[in-house]
Image (tube, grey):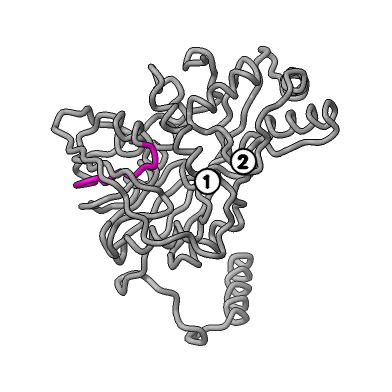
């Protein structure tokens, strides 16, 4: 298996300042209750039961931290965004927490108590040490078992891309937030693993006369802002970033994806690929994308999103037609100021 010693990060920001775990952490695992079925508009793209098994398998490995490098990095980025907000959050929720990749970078001065939700019970059993009191809840991210207006902060890191009904999941996050609460999330973007996707498609087309999807579909950046607004959020921010990791080869990359619990779980996935097709894909990958040192890159595109739940105290745009100066008058003022500068 490929560990941290077998890969090279092209860039990596320093992790957020963490506080060593000293105090007692409260851990209770409870069953999540689904408040109804998925909405009729939802597409059933992913096998959620298979995803739970994949994440449980990954969490049972002897050294699961070997594959945590990507989730650690994104978790620290989300924690940085939490620290950017100058307030204390008495109650916070992590949707799809895994082993607690966000909470470990936060301290009790910022968050009073943390609820961590995940579909995989083994991940909850292996949560990382932290100083914030935490409650672990076994529940599906698509069905949050919490009341309205419960949390001051909701975070989610690299989990929502496996949800079948993303609009409904965002609506539930908005529902459990208190007024003036904030949601900070991250999910994989559409350009994630484009090198692997292209290599597999070319090799399978050449060897088998056609190709099947082997990399799960991702949400487009243009859709995220619309989905957040549709869920009821305002004052939204959506930005994108890329992390590029170099691996010895394609098979080491696929081994790491399996160790992360990020293997494909789409219903329309192909059960297996022929050996020569896989070898051909590895050769295509190396030929098209190889670095000078012989390694091959894998690109992870990350979408970061921030949305607030409405409160009367929040700043609001002025009503339409309430302006006292037109853009034409502003242009005249700007021209007069320019002429004065030239004459001086």
Left or right of 262? Residue 316 is left
Callout 2 crowding tier (Cα within 10 Å): few <14, some 14–19, many ≥20:
many
Judge by depth and name the residue closer to the eye, 265 or 252.
265
Residue depicted at 52% across the width and 83% down the height: 325
Callout 1 crowding tier (Cα within 10 Å): few <14, some 14–19, many ≥20:
some
Judge by depth and name the residue closer to the eye, 44 or 141.
44
Q: Position of residue 275 (x, y in %)?
A: 73, 18
Residue depicted at 32% across the width and 60% down the height: 176
Q: Position of residue 153 (x, y in %)?
A: 31, 53
Residue on which the image places disc 2: 216
Numbered badge on residue 161: 1
Left or right of 333? Residue 322 is left
User: How many marks on residues?
Assistant: 2
Residues at marks 2 and 1 touching, judged by CB atoms closer than 8 Å: yes
Does the magenta-highlighted stretch encompass residue 306?
Answer: no
**For numbered disc 1, what is the local secondary structure?**
helix
Does the magenta-highlighted stretch encompass residue 117?
Answer: yes
Between the residue at mark 2 and the residue at mark 1, the CA separation in whole angstroms equals: 9 Å
Q: Is residue 249 above or below residue 183?
A: above
Residue depicted at 35% across the width and 31% down the height: 122
**For numbered disc 2, what is the local secondary structure?**
loop
The magenta segment: 111-120
């Amino acid at each position: 298996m490929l560990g941290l010693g077998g890969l090279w990060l092209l860039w990596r920001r320093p992790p957020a300042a963490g506080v060593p775990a000293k105090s007692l952490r409260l851990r209770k695992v409870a069953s999540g209750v689904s408040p109804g079925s998925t909405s009729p508009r939802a597409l059933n793209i992913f096998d959620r039961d298979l995803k739970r098994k994949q994440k449980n398998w990954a969490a049972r490995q002897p050294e699961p931290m070997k594959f945590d490098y990507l989730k650690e990095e994104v978790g620290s980025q989300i924690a940085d965004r939490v620290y950017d907000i100058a307030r204390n959050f008495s109650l916070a929720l992590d949707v799809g927490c895994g082993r607690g990749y966000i909470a470990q970078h936060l301290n009790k001065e910022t968050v009073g108590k943390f609820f961590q939700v995940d579909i995989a019970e083994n991940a909850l059993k292996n949560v990382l040490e932290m100083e914030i009191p935490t409650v672990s809840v076994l529940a599906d991210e698509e069905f949050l078992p919490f009341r309205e207006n419960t949390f001051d902060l909701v975070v989610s890191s690299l989990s929502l891309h496996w949800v079948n009904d993303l609009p409904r999941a965002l609506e539930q996050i908005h529902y459990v937030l208190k007024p003036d609460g904030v949601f900070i999330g991250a999910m994989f973007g559409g350009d994630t693993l484009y090198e692997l996707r292209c290599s597999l498609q070319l090799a399978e087309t050449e060897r088998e006369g056609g190709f099947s999807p082997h990399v799960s579909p991702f949400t487009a950046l243009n859709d995220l802002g619309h989905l957040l607004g549709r869920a009821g959020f305002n004052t939204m921010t959506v930005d994108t970033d890329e992390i590029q990791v170099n691996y010895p080869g394609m098979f080491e990359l696929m081994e790491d994806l399996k160790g992360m619990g990020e293997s494909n779980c789409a219903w329309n996935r192909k059960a297996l690929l022929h050996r020569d097709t896989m070898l051909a894909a590895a050769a295509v990958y190396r030929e098209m994308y190889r670095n000078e040192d012989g390694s091959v890159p894998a690109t992870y595109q990350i979408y970061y999103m921030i949305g607030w739940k409405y409160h009367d105290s929040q700043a609001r745009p002025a009503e339409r037609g309430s302006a006292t100066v037109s853009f034409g008058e502003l242009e005249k003022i700007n021209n007069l100021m320019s002429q004065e500068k030239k004459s001086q």
